[in-house]
Amino acid sequence: IKGNVIEGVRNARYCEIIPIVRDRFHLVATVYNTLGLNDCPADVWAAITEDSMKKPFGAITVLLNGPRYFLMDSITAKGATKAGKKIEAGGLALTERASIDLGLFDMLHRSYRETTIDRDTLYLFKAGSPVFMLEAPDGSRYVMQAYAQIVDKTLSYNDPPALSARLKLPSGWRYTTMVPEKDLVAGAEGKATVVQDDLENTYQKLD
């Protein structure tokens, strides 16, 4: 890690603990992430349960999000994302990375529907390395930031190029693979718009 830049994160394993607390008529989800602190050891992660995490966070529910593997080459964290506090939970060291303001009846995991996350980051995908994209009917494009071993626990770095045959894409959506000739940057200046596919792989919307 160099200052607020985390290098060499392509295919880096991480996990997230996301407690959800009630704030009057909203649900607020805070994202705590293991990146840069540990690689989310499988035995430690397997021992963590949603119920065991509720009390420490004072949460109405806790989402366990992982294991996941990043697909960008570096992450630059700025603002509140850079200064996120470090905690320990369930034997894992984590850093606060983002927050999500959910409507009271909102759901966090909705395939192919946009969710807005409060974070201040730059994701760099280096030229010459593959990137994987979703394209919506309105022309919006989303770049895969991480693949997940949640729905398919055997998914690996070699699998995304062939996912178009596996994903249950809504009408008009496309999944594509490209190798950029120039560095691709996915920025989030305080807000990031993300979607997940039906395997819970996560994508960030490009400007």
Image (cartoon, grey):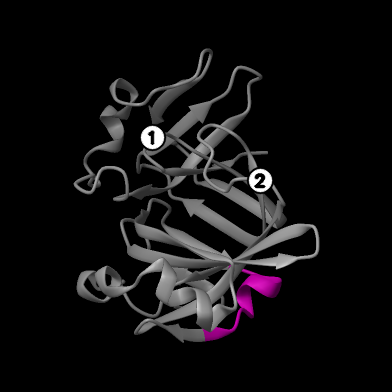
Mark 1 is on which residue type?
Val
The residue beneath circle 1 is 179
- Badge 2 amino acid: Asp
Mark seen at residue 147 = none
Q: Secondary structure at mark 2?
A: loop
Q: Going 63% across and 52% down the picture, which residue do you hit? A: 187
| Coordinates of residue 31 in the picture (x, y in percent) | 55, 66
The magenta stretch is 77-86
Q: Tell me residue 22's x, y (percent).
A: 70, 65
Check the image and report above or below for 28 versus 1. above
Q: Residues within 10 Å of mark 2 (few under 14, many from 20)?
A: few
Residue 35 shows in this picture: no
**Residue that carries the numbered disc 2 in the rendered image:** 106
Residue 142: name its quadrant: top right
List x then y, in percent, for residue 96: 57, 75
Q: Which of disc 2 and disc 1 is earlier in sequence? A: 2
Q: Nearer the viewer, residue 69 or 57?
A: 57
Query: What kind of element bears circle 1?
Result: loop
Outermost residue, right side: 24
